[in-house]
Image (cartoon, rainbow, N blue to C red):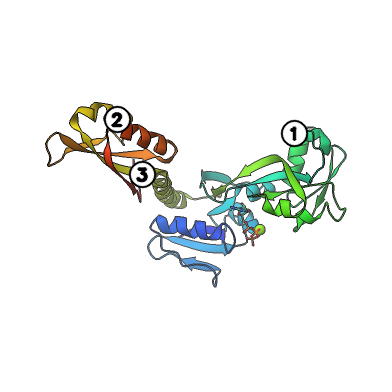
Amino acid sequence: MNLKVAIQKSGRLHEDSVALLNDCGIAVKNGHNHLKSVADNFPLEVYFLRDDDIPQYVEDNVAHIGIVGENVLFEKGKSIDVVEQLGFGKCRISVAVKKGERYDGMQYLNGKRIATSYPVITQKFLDDNKISAEIHEISGSVELAPSIGLADAVCDLVSSGSTLFMNGLQEVQTILKSQAVLVKSKQLDPGQQQLLDQLLFRIRAVKKAKNNKYVLMNAPNDALDKIIALLPGMKSPTVLPLAETGWSSVHSVLSEDEFWEKIEALKNAGAQGILVVPIEKMII
Ligand code: ATP
Ligand code: MG
């Protein structure tokens, strides 16, 4: 029995999705010339699809699980469950208006025409804020709409904002922050759920490892107390004597968000020769 996973065939989520499976020790061939591939060393079958179609496949249980952006997930409104946020494919859906236009809050949008390929998400934002505006659904080149007179504002996917800028628009309001998520069907049988749990265990180990670094440093023994107090470690730091008397080697794990702050403090406390090493998997 195979667990069937739907991932994007090509586009912004494709590479990170394949890389995630590979990092989980699952050898998946690249999907550019295939629609389907079977992993060699895990009972997993991969379907390569347009991202828009993934929620439907998962709802129908044709694919048991999938990797898709929250933007697409919320827009499609299918009845499926989010299992895990994956930390890649980060982008946002924002409202943009013509450069130079005075936007003085959401009320600006009252009575306006908004062009978007996300009518569901846009309508929800309008309803939540009790704004009444006209939505024009278009499937591409949304950022052109204001300059050709089709709309007063757009509601579109933004990553850096450079596309908006080049089209004479300014981003004025974020309405959804999105990243890739792992989703699952509501109809998994116990065997499929068990395979998903195994996969999820690996995904979490990979994610955790990416957010952490292994650090090694030398420390004079009289500075050890201060240094150990700065280090969390998985339980507590490892302290090993160096060949030179009066010195120790201290090993620990630091998370990305506190990393630079801690390194600075460790140096000030007397640590020397600090080495930082990536961690491949982390199982707690
Ligand atoms: P498909 O052919 O599969 O329908 P698409 O053209 O609709 O692809 P892409 O542009 O490849 O979609 O984007 C896929 C998803 O990646 C988006 O729905 C969004 O979740 C995410 N995404 C979009 N832009 C970015 C970006 N600049 N950086 C990271 N992720 C992004
Ligand atoms: Mg798409």
Crowd around label 1: few <14 · some 14–19 · many ≥20 (10 Å) = few
Q: Mark 1 against mark 2, which lies toward the viewer?
A: 2
- Disc 1 marks a residue whose amino acid type is Asp
How far separated are the C-alphas under marks 2 and 3?
A: 20 Å
User: Who is closer to the viewer here, 85 or 2?
Assistant: 85
Q: Quadrant of the image for the N terminus?
A: bottom left
Position of 259 with respect to 176 (left or right) is left
Q: Is residue 232 visible?
A: no
Q: Return the residue at label 3.
A: 213
How far separated are the C-alphas under marks 1 and 2?
A: 52 Å
Label disc, if present, on residue 128 of the rendered structure: 1
Q: Mark 3 against mark 1, which lies toward the viewer?
A: 3
Q: Return the residue at label 2.
A: 269
- Disc 3 marks a residue whose amino acid type is Lys
Report the image quarter containing ligand 1: bottom right
Q: At which x and y percent is residue 131? A: 81, 35
- Disc 2 marks a residue whose amino acid type is Ala
Instruction: Decide: is 177 above or below 68.
Output: above
